Amino acid sequence: MEKTLEGIIIKGIGGFYYVEAAGEVFECKARGAFRKKKITPLAGDRVTITVRQDRENTIDEIHERKNFLLRPPVANIDTLIIVSSVKEPVPSLLVIDKMTAIAVDKGIKPCVVFSKSDLGDTAELEDVYKKAGIDIVSVCCKTGEGVEKVKEMIGEGITVFTGNTGVGKSSLLNCIDERFSLATGEVSDKLGRGRHTTREVTLYHIGNGLVADTPGFSSLDIEQSSDVIVKENLPFCFPEFSEYLGTCKFTSCSHTVEKGCCILEALKEGIIHPSRHTNYVAMYNEVKDLKEWQL
């Protein structure tokens, strides 16, 4: 006896995939056809599976992805929450801006969280991203400041938290939902974490959404070729540029140094934050000579 179900992959490990469907979790193998097509199922993939009593369950179809990351490997992400500490370690706004740009390029909503707000004033940092129209919150896990706002950021879809080692990502997740640490232990036992590599992504139910636990990936691998943004697309990855695009004097305007550039004019008027434009120029210079065949 067998049945067909629609579900979502919540973990893949050692060639086995754990699919949540109809209120249960089923261990499945991917059909060989995926391997021939060099398609690897990812956590977050919406799939069709066949569940059998006498033979192994199989993933028969991977539904079209709206986006995906390779490092960490997650599909169909709705929100990327970039966690950076105010101090210890000091924040790199260039790294944050690269991450927000990658998110926008992939149709993912970026949010920025500054942790350890008890160690320093976050007003100037918040101003950078408020001007950019990016959701921003400062949090302190010791006092609980800002934790409710981060919960609201998670929403109902798939959320990935990213941030360098030491920024307090795990502490923040445990503040968001104290069951998270328990849930990770329970699900890990069920899915066999510890027996395999710990660089596998697992999705957990937090609030009304799913949060990706990305062990071993302290931050997005922002140098991976799949996430390189070509120079033509880069201006569209800075939300505060959008109303000025197409209005510059020259259609080939790179928005870096040209006369008649409306973005540079907005920068001069204080509408666009200098830090964001400086980082845009740095990113533009990294890719301006890149050819499509090099990607």
Image (cartoon, rainbow, N blue to C red):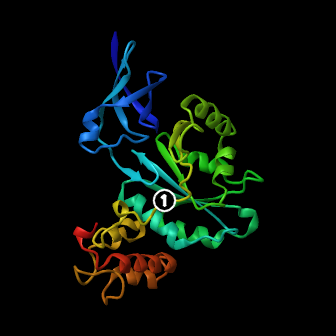
Visible residue check, residue 180: yes
Q: Nearer the viewer, residue 129 or 175?
A: 175
Question: In which quadrant of the rendered view does residue 192 lie?
Answer: top right
* Helix, strand or loop for disc 1: loop
Q: Residue at position x 34%, y 70% from top?
A: 234
How many numbered tags mark residues here? 1
Badge 1, how many Cα within 10 Å: few under 14, some, many 20+? many
Q: Which residue is mark 1?
A: 220
Image coordinates for residue 120, horizontal then vertical, percent: 73, 69
Q: Residue furthest front?
A: 195
Could you tell me the amino acid type at mark 1? Leu
Q: Is residue 233 left or right of residue 270?
A: left
Question: In which quadrant of the rendered view does residue 35 lie?
Answer: top left
Q: Residue at position x 43%, y 33% from top?
A: 17
Image coordinates for residue 278, horizontal then vertical, percent: 46, 80
Q: Residue at position x 65%, y 71% from top?
A: 90
Visible residue check, residue 206: no
Q: Is residue 154 above or below residue 245?
A: above
Q: Nearer the viewer, residue 61 or 106?
A: 61
Q: Is residue 38 above or below residue 121?
A: above
Q: Residue furthest bottom?
A: 259
Q: Nearer the viewer, residue 38 or 187?
A: 38
Image coordinates for residue 282, horizontal then vertical, percent: 42, 79
- From the image, which quarter does the N terminus lie in? top left
Question: In which quadrant of the rendered view does residue 295 lie?
Answer: bottom left
Image coordinates for residue 27, horizontal then vertical, percent: 45, 26
Q: Residue at position x 34%, y 81% from top?
A: 255
Q: Is residue 161 left or right of residue 48?
A: right
Q: Is residue 117 above or below residue 94?
A: above
